[in-house]
Amino acid sequence: MIEIDNIHKNFEANNVLKGVYANIKMGEIFTIIGPSGQGKSTLLRILNTLETPSSGKIFFDGNDLFSGKKTPVDVRRRMSMVFQKTAVFDMNVFDNIAIGLKYRGFSKTDISETVNRALDEIGLSGYGGRSAGTLSGGEMQRVALARAIVSKPDVLYLDEPTASLDPVNTEKIEELILHYNREYGTTIVMSTHDMLQGQRLSDRIGVMMDGRFLQIAAPDEIFSRPGNENVARFIGINNVFYGTIKEKYSDGVHGTLKSGNVVIIVKTNYKFGDRVTFCIRPEEITVHDHRAEPIKGRNMLPGKIVSIHRQGRMMYADIDAGITISAMVTWEQYEGSGFEEGNNVMLSFKPRSVFVMEKV
Amino acid sequence: MNYIIEGIYQAFVLIITLNPEVVDITIRTLTITLGATLIASVLCIPLGIYIAFNEFYGRKTLISVIQTLYALPTVVVGLVMYMILSNNGPLGFLDLLFTSTGVMLGQVVLILPIITGLTISALSNLDSTIRDTIVSLGATTGQFFTSMVLEARFAIMSAVIMGFSRAISEVGAAIMIGGNIKGHTRILTTAITLETNIGNFSLSVALGIILLLIALTVTMIVSRFQQS
């Protein structure tokens, strides 16, 4: 539906987008994830024709959006956008939601029916006559979302729509995003720096860093098979290492990988002698007592706990096993086993838990 | 001291009894100033919109010039308009010198920069997200301008009222262009100047009170708009 072809955008000497490629499919929720200042908002603004690219093309249903001097209004009306900074017009809630319908010349009856249904959907029935400026931040953002969707655009762009909201309002907005996508079939392209939000809502995720997509894939794929070191670190995998394939087994898919003095069994398509980056998800590592017996089919590494830190209900232990590996420990495990800093432990993980990302 | 108290007393008598001369001057003043404000608004608001939303060579300089002209001396306006409207001037054939219309034109010139400049500020100060939202909702160019003006309506109304205040309180241009002719071009400010010079304090104070009341009303309206 939308083809992004080698988009560059410069603001004077500042190169914000440096060659963005992507294909967005009709009806999907595509999330652009990345740290702040990497070009997510700029790309959305270009897609919504609020900015023009310095070079490159964007095809919307096969038509080049920037072929003419100005994008025709009938094309612009097939898309809509909600911004990170909530904006409501200095009018009542009903008129705020109705404004796009008025631009399109809808009748008063149609406007009334559509806006009242939208107010129901966003949980603000009875708020129509209220001045929009008196709403809370979460309510304003719901009004902005309803305003963007009532004209039934083919594509809805959302620029970090929950960035300034509390968890309760974030959940409501997420429910609405899923509702609009499932109910109306609206293609949704949104940006966020919240990886878990991306995972919850998206059909596909594009990880954007330094002005380009480093990886575009389904959420599960991104989280289990990050494309490279930067993506792995951004999605919260600290266990990223360099190593060399030391041996390939006869099955062609398994082998050993050496990183520092540590040798582990991995599943990889890379060849003997290749220097690679690899990662291990902390939650796929089990921490045992240091006297644990070897377990068949698992890598076993002795190590010493360097530090333990808590994140919510989970504990993370940094363990020096020749390379410093971060492992997840449940609170119960922590309380029951007496794991403490300085203790010797044994780590175990399956060869398939090691993801060899790329050749260096 | 007594003549001041006597003057104030007589002024209230003139106002309460609706003295024909006071009423005549007040009506003429309001007619000329409201007319000037209307003409200036019709010219300046679209001009302000154009300057606010278009990039062109010299735009920043133009805005600086407009803002500098907020303090345009009224006697300079009077002098320039006198030269333009006098028999030998380029618009001398219109016979507008020493007429109410001439005074109105002088006031239009005086308040053009204020209304234009404040309209530009009103539109430029709107949140950029509002501007983006209007575009992203599919507005045509006309709908975009209408929505932006509606969003800045209170600030633009304040600009118009500020223009009115400047026009109604000026005296230099009105005297030079209008000549302060009784029954024709005499307005509140020029009448106060004249009556004070000839020692008719009661009429001067009466006219001054009316001018203050108009100024007070305008201030209240401006403050109401600003709060909005």
Image (spheres, coloured by chain):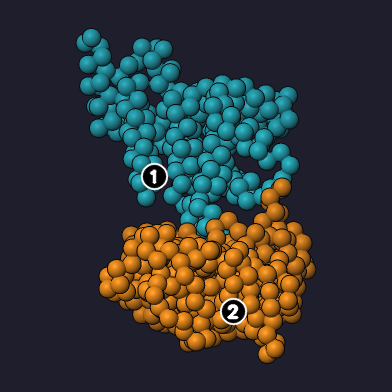
- The type of residue carrying mark 1 is Gln
Q: Where on the picture, by quarter, is residue B98?
A: top right
Question: Does residue B201 appear in this view?
Answer: yes
Crowd around label 1: few <14 · some 14–19 · many ≥20 (10 Å): few
* Number of residues whose C-alpha sits closer than 10 Å to that of mark 2, classed few (under 14), some (14–19) or many (20 or more): many
* Residue A124 image offset from top left, x and y in percent: 33, 74
Q: Which mark is residue A116?
A: none
> Please, which chain is the residue tagged with disc 2 on?
A
Chain identifier matching the orange colour in the rendered picture:
A
Q: Give chain B's shade.
A: cyan
Q: Where is residue B57 drawn, in percent x and y?
A: 74, 42
Q: Please state the horizontal and vertical placement of residue B5, each as a whole percent of the image.
A: 22, 16
Quarter-of-image position of residue B196: top left
The residue sitting at 72% across, 26% down in the picture is B89
Specify the label residue A265 is tagged with: 2
* Residue B160 horizontal side relative to residue A225, left or right: left
Q: Secondary structure at mark 2?
A: strand
Q: Is residue A144 visible?
A: no
| Residue at x-position 59% and y-position 26% | B77
Residue B150 picture location, percent across and down: 49, 57
User: Of B149 and A305, which appears nearest the observer?
Assistant: A305
Q: Nearer the viewer, residue A302 or A72?
A: A302
Indicate which disc residue B226 carries.
1
The residue at 57%/33% (across/down) is: B67
Please tell me which residue is depicted at 30% across the width and 72% down the height of the picture.
A337
User: Is B12 positioned to the left or the right of A247 in the image?
Assistant: left
Viewed as shown, does residue A333 lie left or right of A194?
A: left
* A110 to A359, vertically: above or below: below
